[in-house]
Image: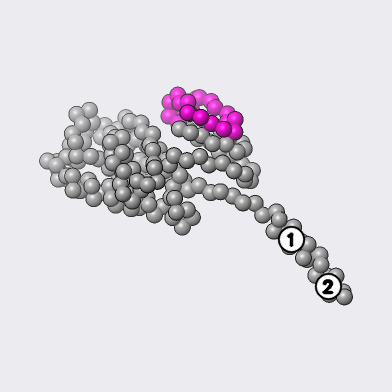
Amino acid sequence: MKKYLLLLPLFFVGLVSIAQKKQYKSAIVGFYNLENLFDTIDNTLINDEEFLPNGIRNYNTTIYRDKLAKLAAVIAQMGAAYSPDGPALLGVAEIENDTVLKDLVNEPQIQKRNYRYVHYDSKDARGGGGATGVRRVQQYSGSGGSGFAILRFAGSYTAAATTGSPDRREGGGYTYYTWTGNGSITI
């Protein structure tokens, strides 16, 4: 009888610990340096001559399309061990312009993820130094642990919609949205 009395409290402790497990929804966030993703069209406003068909790299449509396919294959694998949907938010760098982003998000390996992008031109003379945000059109919400989230956008930016009453402020050439609880943002 004493053995059963000792097991009874352990049984209740086990039930309490199971009942207190929290369920979290995760989102994959990543960054990828696309290492000089340039198209083959001459832009007279930047120094992109080395990435033209007659440039020193002999960069052509075949090379460009091959690079897009390889980059998309890597992006398709990012975070796949944790989510089959891949990154919900992906920052990228070293791109020439928004045209190459459009081509990238339309690659067959990642096209069904419905990525959208926000691009800004950098002050790099080659045009390839700007950071870019690529994100899947999806809202994330739910209950979770304590913490906060901060999103930073270059310049003055107003989101299409937010939930969770984030604090919005501008400073230093950026717009910040800060959440201390549940919330979402539609860009």
x, y percent for residue 152: 48, 33
Q: Is residue 128 visible?
A: no
Query: Residue at the spot x=80%, y=70% of the render?
Result: 7
Q: Where's residue 149, x and y in %?
A: 55, 38
What is the quadrant of the C terminus in the image?
top left
Quick check: 11 above or below 35?
below
Please give left or right for residue 37 compared with residue 62 in the image. right
- Residue 163 part of the magenta-drawn span: yes
Side of 88 where 120 appears, left or right: left
Residues 73 and 148: in front is: 73
Residue 15 badge: 1
Q: Which residue is drawn at 33% across and 43% down?
A: 105
Q: On the image, numbered disc 2 is attached to which residue?
A: 4
| Of residues 173 and 177, the one drawn nearer to the viewer in this rendering | 177
Q: Badge 1, how many Cα within 10 Å: few under 14, some, many 20+?
A: few
Q: Give the range drawn in magenta.
A: 153-175
Count every numbered label the image shows and give the total: 2
Determine whether label 2 and label 1 are within 8 Å by CB. no
